[in-house]
Structures are given as C-alpha cells and as structure tokens.
Image: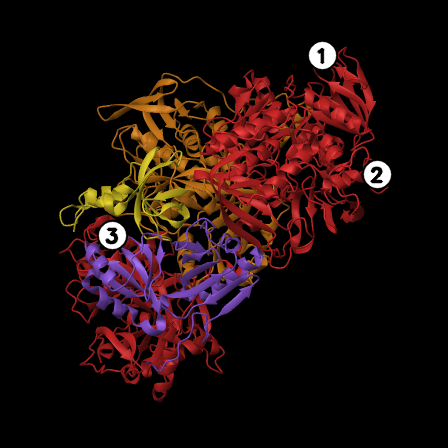
Amino acid sequence: MASLQAMTALGAHGAAVVEIGPLRISERLDVALASVAARRGRMADLAKTAKAAGIPLPEPARHQSGEPYSTFWVAPEMWFVEAPYSSHELIADLLKTALGDAASVTEQTDAWVVFDLAAPNLSPVLERLCNVDFQVVAEGYATRTVMEHLGVYLIKRGPGSARIYGPRSSAESLLHALETAAAAAF
Amino acid sequence: MIIHHPILGPRDAQEFVYLGDATLIDRPDGMTAGVEAFHDYLYNRDNPAGEHRELWYHEQGDRSWLVVTRNTVTHEITKVELARDVARARGRTK
Amino acid sequence: MRYSGFRVIAEALTGHKGWKPVWRDPAPQAEYDYIIVGGGGHGLATAYYLAKEFGQARIAVLEKGYLGGGNVGRNTTIIRSNYLLDGNEPFYEFSLKLWEGLEQDFNYNSMVSQRGIINLIHTDAQRDAATRRGNAMIMHGADARLLNRDEVRAMYPWLNFDNARFPIKAALMQPRGGTVRHDAVAWGYARGADQRGVDLIQNCEVTGMRIENGRIRGVETSRGFIGAKKVGVAVAGSSSKVMAHAGMRLPIESHVLQAFVSEGLKPLIDGVMTFGAGHFYVSQSDKGGLVFGGDIDGYNSYAQRGNLPVIEDVAEGGMALMPAIGRVRLLRTWGGIMDMSMDGSPIIDKTGIEGLYFNGGWCYGGFKATPASGWAFAHLLAKDEPHKTATAYRFDRFLKGRIIDEKGQGAQPNLH
Amino acid sequence: MSQSHRIDAKLAGGQIDRTRTLRFTFDGIPYQGHPGDTLASALLANGVRLMGRSFKYHRPRGPISAGSEEPNALVELRTGGRQEPNTRATVAELYDGLEANSQNRWPSLRFDAMGINDKLSTFFAAGFYYKTFMWPKSFWEKLYEPIIRRAAGLGSVTREEDPDTYDKGFLHCDLLVIGAGPAGLMAALTAGRAGKRVILADEDFRMGGRLNAETFAVGDSQGADWAAVSVAELSAMPNVRLMTRTTVVGAFDHGIYSAVERVSDHLLTPAAGKPRQVLWRIYTGHAILAGGATERPIAFENNDRPGIMLAGALRAYATRWGVKVGERIAVFTNNDDGLRTALDLQAKGVDVVAVIDSREGGDLLPGIRHLRGAEVIDSTGSLGLKSITVRQSNGRSETIAVDALGVSGGWNPNVNIHSHHRSRPVYDASIAAFVPGQDGPQGLLVAGAATGAMSTHAALKTGRDAAMAALGLGTGPDLPQAEDAPVRITPLWHVGHGKGRAWIDQQNDVTVKDVKLAKQENFTSVEHLKRYTTLGMATDQGKTGNVIGLAIMAELTGRSIPETGTTIYRPPYTPVAMGTLAGRSRGKEFKPFRLTPSHHWAKEQGAVFVEVGNWLRTQWVPKAGETEWRQSVDREVLATRKSVGICDVTTLGKIDIQGTDAGAFLDRVYANTFSTLPVGKCRYGLMLREDGIVFDDGTTARMGENEYVMTTTTANAVTVFRHLEFCRQCLWPEMDVQLISTTEAWAQFSVAGPNARKLLQKIVDQDISDAAFPYMGAGSITVCGGLRARLFRISFSGELAYEIAVPTRYGDALLREMLAKGAEYDPIVYGTEALGVMRIEKGHVAGGELNGQSTALNMGLGKMVSKKKDAIGMVLSQREGLTEESGYRLVGVKPVNPEAKLTAGSHFLETGAAAVAENDGGWLTSKVYSPHLGCDIALGYLKGGDRKIGQRMRIVNLLAGLDTEVEIISPHMFDPEGERLRG
C-alpha cells in the first residue's frame, strides 16, 4: 500500500541466508508481531475473546502455534503474537478489534530481527551462546535469554530447529555472534 | 547464583538486576508522610548478616520484580516471591 | 627499635638475631580512655594519630581476627585524590599529603609510590566531566593534567588505540596518584601505635556495647567486658553488625568487591590506569603481578568471595583495553566487604550515644583514605569536633539533602 | 645424545608413541620428543634438568613435579603475539615445532648475572624492604623502586595483540566429576551407568590420573589399562561428556563451576574458526571433587637443586613417560609411598643407590640400600645435583654421589576447590595432612585421595559411594580388586641443621629461616606468615609448600598444627588466561553495535559517527569541500534554522503505556501532571528519583483515552523502563497499567525549521496546517499513501518542528523520500553536534545538565514539581540542602570578547577572585559555537545564578590555562519568546 521500499534489519532488501557447516541461519521478513497484555483483572475476558479469535495464550515459557496466529509467553499476563506479515501487516489493529478493551495491544513487528536456525543438532552452537539447556527443554519452549550481551527470545521448534528474536538495531552484531559460534562449534 | 523464579523456575542471577532491601516496597504516602519518613524509607537499612529480603528485577527475562529471601553470609536462597504479590499482601493499592 | 639501611646490614651480618617483635600481644586492661573497635587500616591509623598527634594515652585497638585482616589487606592498593565534590576533595587531598610523608613518619617502608594515575576518556561528555573534576582538584590544591590521545599513546603505546569499540580520546591524570604496599600500611601503623603504648588486642571480638543513660561505658568482648570513656568504631565490612549493638540502623549496605592479581610479569604498566568504557582498573605491583579490579558484585553480601559474572566482566574490560594480555594468567581472586553508603561517600561522625563515634561507609574509597581517616577520626574522638577536611561526613546529610554523590547515582549503594 | 634418558621400551614403554618423533626447541637448542610427552618429560628425556631460575635469588631450578603444582620449571612458550609467560613445562603438552625459552635470567639460563642475589641472600631476608629504602624520601620512586621493578617479575609479556580467539559456553549436568583418576572414573561409571547426565573433566590430556603413573593392577589389568577401558565405556554413553584438557578452576554459588578447556594448546596454531580455549560455566545438580593429592617435599639445606624432585614425580616420569631423571638416584622419605618409588625405579633398571628413610626401625627393602632413621641434610651441584649429604641414625654423615633425588614428605589432599567458599580444611594426623572440612560448596562431595583416602581401593570405593550419595542411587557397580595399602607416615617437615637455607616455597625463595624470622618479629598468624614472607603467593599458590611453612610455624610457637590453622585456597585452582575469561568480548566486539534506521544512508554520505551507549549516531554529515568539522556543523545549524533539517532521533527511548490508570500512573512517576493532558496532545515531562534529583526528561503523548507514548533520553531508556516496572509492580500493583518498549519498532525523525511543515505536508497524507495540527499536537497519521505513522509537533531546536515515526523497516526510505520530495527546500540531515548546538541555543537541558546531581530547581524547572499530588521524589526534593537560594541555577554564558573560546567543565569565578575552592562559583555543563550569535556559548550551573543574569564573571580552565571574561545571560539564548516554534 505504501510507496516506500522496506529495508531489512541487515540493511538489505531481501532476507539473509547463511550456511556454516551443517547450520543454516535464515532471516525471516514475513513475520508480523504484536504484544498482547491483559488489562488488570480482565484475564478471564481476554481468554474468552482470544479463544473466539483463535489466538492461543500459552502457559509461561511456552510457544503455541496456530493459524494464522501463533503466540509465545513473554511476561505475566503478556504474550507476543505472531502472524504472516503479508496478510497481517496491521496485526495490532486486527488484535485490538478482536480482543476489545480486555487487552492492551502494541505493534512489535519492526522492533525485532528474526532468525530461524536449522541443523541436525543445535546444542553445540547454542551452548556457546546462551544459558539454555536446549537439549533438555521441550519443543515449544520459549524464553528470553542473553547472547553476547544481547537480550533475545529463543523458541525451540524442534531438536534441530529454533527461532531467535533479537533487537533489530543489533541485527548485524547478533548475526556475527551466531556465525562465529557456529564456526567454533562445527 | 541461581534464583528459583516462581513462574519460570531456576534462572541465572545474571539475568536479573538487583535493587536492594525489599522494604523499598513500603513507600510512604507523599501526601501525608514528611521528609523524615521518606528519609528513613530511602536511606536507612538493617543490612543484616544473615537472612535478607531483597528486590531483584528479571530484566533479561519476564520483567518480573521478585522478592528474594537470601542469606547474605552463605548466599543460600530460601524463598522467592513475586514482588507484586508481596506488595498486595502488604496492602498497597492505588 | 628504629629501622634503617644500616640496621638491615648490621642484622644481616649478625644472623638477624636482633630483630624485635613489631608489636606486643598485651592482655586487655579493665578500662581505657579510648577503645578503637577494628584493627584494620583505619582503626590502627586512628590509634596511631590519637597517641602521636593528640597526645592521648590509655588506648586500645580491639581486633576480632588478626591485625590488618580487613580491607586494608584485600584491596588494589591505589592512592589518589582525584575527587570532584567539595565534601570529598579536601579530605582525600589531605590523605594524599599524609601518604607522602608516611614512611618517614612511622619509620616503615610501605612503598608509597607516586607513579601517577590516569582515568581514560572515551567520549566528549567524559572529557567535559573530567575538565570539571580536574579544575575542582586544582582549586583544592591537588594536581591534575588533561592528556590528549597522543600523550596517552606515548605512555602506553600497546593499549587498544586502533581497533577499539570505544576509542581512547584523552585521559585525566593525577601525577601524584599511585600505589602503596597495603599490608605494610597496617603493619607500620600497628608498630607505630604499639611503640607509643597502644594495646593492640587481636582475636578479641566485640559482642556488645554497655550503654547507660545514653552514654557508652565500654564494650562486651569475646575476652570479657572492657570499659572505656570513648569508643570509636572503624570496622569496614561489619559496620551495621557492630553499630546494631548500639541499636543503630545505618545508611549503609554491605557488598562484596572482588580484586584480582595476575602471575608475576616483567614490567608492563608503570602507573595506575582506569578504563572509561568498562569496569576495569589496573596497576602492576613491584613483584610484577597485575593488580586489578572492577565493579562490586552488586548484591548485599558478607561472604568474602564473589561470583563469576563480575570476574568475566572485569576480564572483558581488561582485554578491550589491553589486547596484549590475552595470555597473561589470572592467578588469584579474592573478595572484600565494602560498606557502601547511600551516596557513595563516607561517614565520620558522633552518634546519638554520648562517647560513641562512628567511622565507615567508605565504599571503594577506604584504602586511599586510611591516613586522613585515622587523623580525622582521632581528631573527632579527642576534640569532639570534626576535622576541617571531614565536616561534610555527617549522618544527617541525608536528612538535610546535603548528599555527596560523586557519581550522581542516587540512593542506590550498588551503583556507587 | 638425543633422548639419552629415555628408558628402554621393554622396561618402561610408557604412554608415549615412540614410533613418532616431535621436534622442539628450548632456548634455541633443538630437541626431540614423542607424542604423549610434556615439555618437561621431553627435556628430562634429553638429559636437561635445568629449566628455570627462582624469583628472588635466581637459583638454578629444574622441575620438582610432573603436574600443575610445579613452582620451578616455568618457561616462555611460543613467540610473537602468542608468547605466553610462566607456562609450566610439566603440563605443556609437546607438539611438533614447539618453541620455549627460559625466563627471568640474563644473559643466559646457565649464567644469570642476577645470581649475585644468591650470594647476598643474607641481606634479602623476609621483609627486609620494609625496613630500609626510606631515605632520602625522593629516592624511592627515582632509584630504589625502578631497580626493584626491573628485577622483579617472572616471564615477559608481548605487546602484540593475542591473535587467537576464545569462546565461552554453558553446560548443564546432573553430576560434574572433577578429576578422572580412579575415584573420578568410578564415580562417572556409577552415575553414567545409572543414566544420569555426567560431565567428567580432567586437566590432563590423558584420563586416569595417578593410575597412569603407577604400576599396580586394578582388577586383572594394569591400572592405566583399566582407566583406558573405563574411559572407552564412558565415551560410548550418550549421557556422559568426557572433557580432557579441561581444568575446573572455580566453584561458585548454587552449583555453578567454571572450567577451562584447552582446545588448541597442544597445536602449533588453532584450526580455522576454532578458539584457543573455552571458558565453560557448568551448571550442576551435584559435583564430586576427585582431584587426588599432591606430594610435598621435606625441607633440607640446598633442597632446591635441579635433579631434586618429589618422589612421586620421579616415579611418574619413569612409568608414564619412560624417562629416568638421573643415572644414580636416591630417595628421601618419611612414609611408605617413597619406598614404592624406589622399587618402581629399580624394577625399570634405574640405579637406586640409596633410600634415606627418616623413620626409625621397621623392615628394610630387599636389594636396595635402605637407611632407616637417616636424613638428607645437604646437597651439592650448582646447575644440577651432584651429591647429597646423609646423616645416618648413628649421627655419622656420608656424602653420596647422585644426580637425582626423590623426596617424599607425604601427600596433601587437593582440597582447593572445596575451600572456594571459604570452608577451612581440617588436619588429619593419621596422614599428616589437611582434609576437606565442613560447609564446603553446596552439593559438592569429595572422593578419593582428595578426602585423604590414599589407596586405590579407597579411591574406587569413595568414588562410587559419592556418586550414589549425590544422585540417591540405591546400588552401584562392583569394585575391581585394587591395592589397599595403609598410609604409614611419621611427619618430618624439615631437617633442622646448620645455617644454610632450606627451601619451602621454591619459586618465591621462602626458606625455613624466613619462617623463623617471621616468628621472631611476631608475624605468627598464618595470614601474617603468608603476607610477610610471601609464602604460597607464587604462581603455584603454595600447593607443595604452604603446609610445611605452617607446620614449622606451629613447631616454633608451640601451637599444634590445627591451632595454627591454614590459609584458604581462592579461585582459580590453576591460573587462567585473561583472554579465556573475556571470550569474544574484545576489540570491536567488546559490546554489540546498535545502528539507527538512517545508518546506511549516512554511511553512503560519508557521515561521521559517534558512540552513544551502544548506539552509533550520526555526528555530522560532511559535504564536499568541508575540511573541518565545524564547517559541517555550522552549515547544518544554519540550513535548519533557515529552511529545514532532518535528524534521526530513533535512539530516544519509547515506552507504550496503556491501561485505564495510565494517566494516574504518569502523575505518580512524573513531577508534573499528565492525567489532564487531552488526547492528541503531548507534553514535556520531568521525572525525578525518589531522592528528589532529576532522573530523566522527555515528551509524552496521549494517543488515546487509555494510551500514552512516553519518550525517554537515549541514555536512560533501559533504567526508566525498569523504574516504571518497579512502580507498577512494587508500589502500585492495583493500578491498571501495561508497559512495553517500542524504541526499535519505530524509526523516528525530527524535522525542524521554517519549512518543516511544507516539507512534511508533501509526505503526510492528511492536513497538518497549524489549525489542524497545532503546537504540541500528537497523533496517528499515514504517509506516502497509507503507511501508518505517528506525528508529534514538538521542538528541541526552537524551530517549527515535528517528530515523525514510521515502522523501522521504512525509516531509510522515509528519509530518502523526504529529501527527494522536499528538494525545493534544500533540506539537510543534521547530526548530534548540530542537535546540541540548537538545543543549547534554546536552553534545553540534556546530558551535561542531567548529571544525576541536579534538581528541577537547579535547572530552572522548579515550578514543574507539583505539590498537589504524590509523585516520586516530590517530598525529598524539598530538603533544605536542595532548596537553598544560593544553590546552583542554570544560566547561559557567552564570552565578552566574541573571539574568546569557552570549554565545558570550566569553573565560574568572580572578577578578581583567586582560583581556589572557596571562590568556585560553579561550572559550564555544555558548550558549543553558535553560528547565530557568532561566538561560543555555554550552559552552566552557577551558584545563585538566577540573580546574576547580566553580570560579568570569569570562567577558568586551569587544565588549559584559560581565563575568560564572560557575560551571564538567560539560558534561552535563541528566540526566547518561542514565536518560531509556534509559527
């Protein structure tokens, strides 16, 4: 709709893909993101409207996939909701309409850079980056953690698959950290 | 150190930011209390050698403020609560 | 017995048979005029000056462990008077002047070495703040110089000048800053006090205070009750514990500060240096070890040991500043308990209890303050008036809003 | 003579690969060794005993050990940027091409001029330097200390950057086993077979511990073979992680351990992308310390000559490395383990000429000259042992020619890690050594020789039992058969005799005499002993010497050893490279970068960047022909004030505040009022700390009934958010408020200047005329045909100005679009310097004024602090010390002579006043050159400044010798009525 051309967090016009040994790092540009927080004392109402709108509200430290909305827990009575960017660029407006005044909704799409990690086994690289026992936590585990001084969200999608949300302004530093750790690990 | 977060379980203390004695929850009411009350609230501490209730903020986590009961001599942690619950229990309202 | 080069040679030639004990081990007497609680640097200095400068007799120092076992024996040995605020600078400059004559004064070589200290500057804002501070120092009679990048580079060409995340732009230097052999300070003051009749009583822990109608009568100790007309408390790391015996709550939190020493190395760093873009300060001891430190661990603690994150943080600062020390090995870490005050500045004041005096809240500043702290505390004890360089170090400054906050961090001890 | 001291493979094959040869040099001389050698074993194999010089007396020294406790054989390993000082030859794994040099000697290791110190040693008694060098006063820094400093130190440091990289990582396990000797292996087998997650770490490059150095059997195989089989079984378990070359160096709170893995130290250079070492933080359920024990010597005169070693080390070199340290060897012992050394060596065809056993009576060894009740009292051989003098039980002295002597004074359990939380070891007289005490680190158990259980059987048993106890296992594996010899020892700490020197701490040259002097001078506490004599403060941290020193002090004072006590070990267990502790945080990677949305555009333009926290912000954007930064900055200011300028302000913190109590919440956290702010408007907010000092400032807009957007300063974005969460959760938990940071979600630009509106109108889809979008208006809009955006009509520059925000991915494009669409107005992009010029011309406070020491009153904003409501900091801001009329007030400053230069940080003085503290009037907080006023201008805090407007004063910068007459003016130096920004 806009005449402006988007630039990625890495300063490019297309998604970055990097391969180091068995590891594949794919930047994701097609994710719309918004925070949803229950208004004080309105959790029950929010649960109801969210259910009706097909927005999962998973338990703490969990990610739950859905269509079109997937969600992960970020704080007490607060979640980050993902949806396809192409169809949900206005995700905040859509969620506000769906959830009404039971929730506070804030657009988060461009606050983050998103990297998907894929390798037969991600533990050797992740154990060099963050204090998460990746081998042991269950699929769907979602947590905030720290990688090379950067606060990120890490979501385990499978033994060899993870998604990282990192601060957008530090996208280049985060990618560099992932690359060097991978080179040392594999 | 490891802090057993009431919601998230064991987390490295590195993820947290330390503030100080949990009595910082008991802020006087500025419309009724005067300088003396605020002075004692803000500046004076028991600073015990032993059990200490203190405020930690899970900045690299879920942003919860916690009240951690920790022994300042051994560093043993015996209790961790959500500060919000503690504050409510102490009758803090609007 | 007087120490001198001749004495050393004479003793060497006669098998060192003549050396006398540096201090006695007297049994505590029933009563003293002055009891100093704490046989660390400040307590020993207080007793020394009370006896020497204020002509007081019947003085005892009570130490729960061994003399000099507190922070005077577990710090990074730096001396300087590069403070900003009126409440602090005259005091620390007084201290530095006392350091300059100390060894001749108490006839003990504590290796006071004024090889200079530089605070590295990495931003324009830091330069502005350093300019403000350097001018304040000079106006208070101290020495200060602003070095440009090239002058710093000429001094330490192997610092990270060309690949730094936060480039070095300048430095504030105090040429009279330097280091001192920390244990020798405690031993020198102890020896000097002992020679002047002060009873230094080790393994004697204060377990209570006898207070009658608002007046101190003496202290209960692990070696029985000891009476005193005046009691001065100088127990860094235990201030809140000891003053609790008098029912006092203090504007102080106790925190652990770690310090570090590397393996012995041939000379690398001549003076003292502080990194301005991370938590790291360093000097090299005469034995060759790099002595360095950083921030406190940041949580209340009485355990004289720290945790790993701060060790890593300090090493990161060190490597960012000095990329050549990658293979230099950290030999030993230890922890000291800092009594962190609410504005980062100390307290030397009377208390609500007549005859009870307090000296504490030194944060990181304790070691360099040792001579002036002892002198000013002795002055307060002897004359009931604050020394002119220590008039700001009052308890009531927090109530009155006359805070001395060098860092501008507010009432949060772990940020000072 | 290559490897002249290698024992015939048939007698002692050792755990080296004799089929392969490794070449290396020591002090430039080429030698050969085999895979499996250490530098020390290879040098000994080549008949080299002399490897170093001591710290103080520069005595010639060889290795006394075969492990990390080594005090003597320290070398400079590698060259160039990789040169590492003080590396222990006894643990340096040999690789092809290894280069090592001796250190702390001049001109050569064999002839060291500083050896003169040894001749003068009587003048260098413990603490002599505390008693002299005091006159004349000035000579310390000028003469004495420089000499001392030049002489001191051990190895030398390169000035080059370390070319290798270092990693860090996190590991998790149910059980960490520290040490892979018999106890550690048995513990790991017990836990591993039970399916637990186990990490087994050993500092050696080969697991097995002492089993590799012994000849006895475990089960029906050699101990070393049993170890190899056990390692093989463990390595096949997916739940077990074996970490060789990994030293656990520290125990921290709640079961966290630090360990150093030496990934590449056995290679000439690390493989591509691989680190030299890794610092692992290991998070454990439980840990077992199975670190074994360290043998200690017996002090006698001249007991430090190359060739005199710990008996167990002689045994290890023979058994593990097939090396005989000498041709004629004697053993001096006070316990049975020394006898084992003699027998093992003899079995390998080594000529054992005598066993000097300090114990009276008892059996004699068959086939060896075994002297009971005898002591070694002296030795000869300046660069290497030639002979020993033995005093026999009948008092007769005898000189025996030997070139190697093994000394065994008993074994000290390695309690080190167990003491890291200040737990004090306790003395066990039955083995004459300290064993782990109570209150060690939570969850840490101890097994094997580290507990004082010295036999192989005891090691296996305590290893298994500790694992079962730690993990609550009901059963464990059966134990293989192994020797269970009791410890038979009669303590002997030093041989009292004569006037010579008997070494306790060989590296620091601390002798029995020094301990006696310490006692004589009343330094009798163990801490005083250590600090006065430097006992145990060398790179080996007294692993072999400390106990002897305190035992001698106990003897001298008549106290028992337990009464005397011991100093406690501190981390790390062995020294750790600084690079390892720093990991990747070096050079440009010291901290991550934060890049603004306009970064790439600015880079194309050749902009100059400045670090603001982790952000890189555009400082100015030079145009062709501009040679000096001021030209660019002046142009940016003038162009903005003349037409329009654009500045990236994305770095300012943005916090989304929603909820039915959002307005009331803001009233509590801001000194001024926000609940009354109409929707669609924004307001400048002043935030105080509870102590009444200004914390932060910024504009906050009301985007909806229950929705505000707060902006913070760049510096305080994180701390303000933390503070708001504290207020929300801890102070007023019942308020309906939700917070989320949106700093990076929006690219935000300030568009300032007379033509700002005209330019923006070409971008914004709706009408933004003054009527439609008045001063301090705020709202959601769309730009460029429908892109969601936010517009705030606020000004930091004093111009008609807006801040416009779009989703970050469109920030770059929006900037380019504004420059293109607004071309007719010659828009420029300005950086932080021009921003600073304009805000100072306008008198807005920022970094220099928001210094954490200033109140609203100081800033001239006292009226903003509402007393009608309870807000953070309101009460304490009224303290007398913060409200004095004579206090600091913000003023503007300009030089009387427009040519004169000002410097921020300069201080105010009255005309004619001396530059002393009593006359100090305050200081300049910020200074810029104002192209409009045509001179330097500044803001400053001046005592009673509000009453000094219009007066003349001086500002001095004593660091630069500047003394300038200035006029005190209003801080609002540009368009004080504010017509331009309302225009």
Q: Chain C's colour?
A: orange
The quarter of the picture where the N terminus of chain D appears is top right
Q: Image quadrant of residue D966? A: bottom left
Secondary structure at numbered mark 3:
helix
Secondary structure at numbered mark 1:
loop
The quarter of the picture where the C terminus of chain D appears is bottom left
What mark, if any, has residue D693 been given in the picture?
A: none
Residue A138 or residue D137, whichever sits in front: A138
Up/down of D922 relative to D8, above or below: below
Residue under mark 1: which chain is it in? D
Q: Do the CB atoms of the residues marked 3 and 1 lie less than 8 Å apart?
A: no
Residue under mark 3: which chain is it in? D
Distance, label 1 to label 2, CA atoms, is 37 Å
* Residue that label 2 marks: D4
Residue D60 or residue D657, whichever sits in front: D657
Q: Chain B's colour?
A: yellow
Same subunit, labels 3 and 1: the answer reads yes
* Residue that label 3 marks: D727
* Residue that label 1 marks: D362
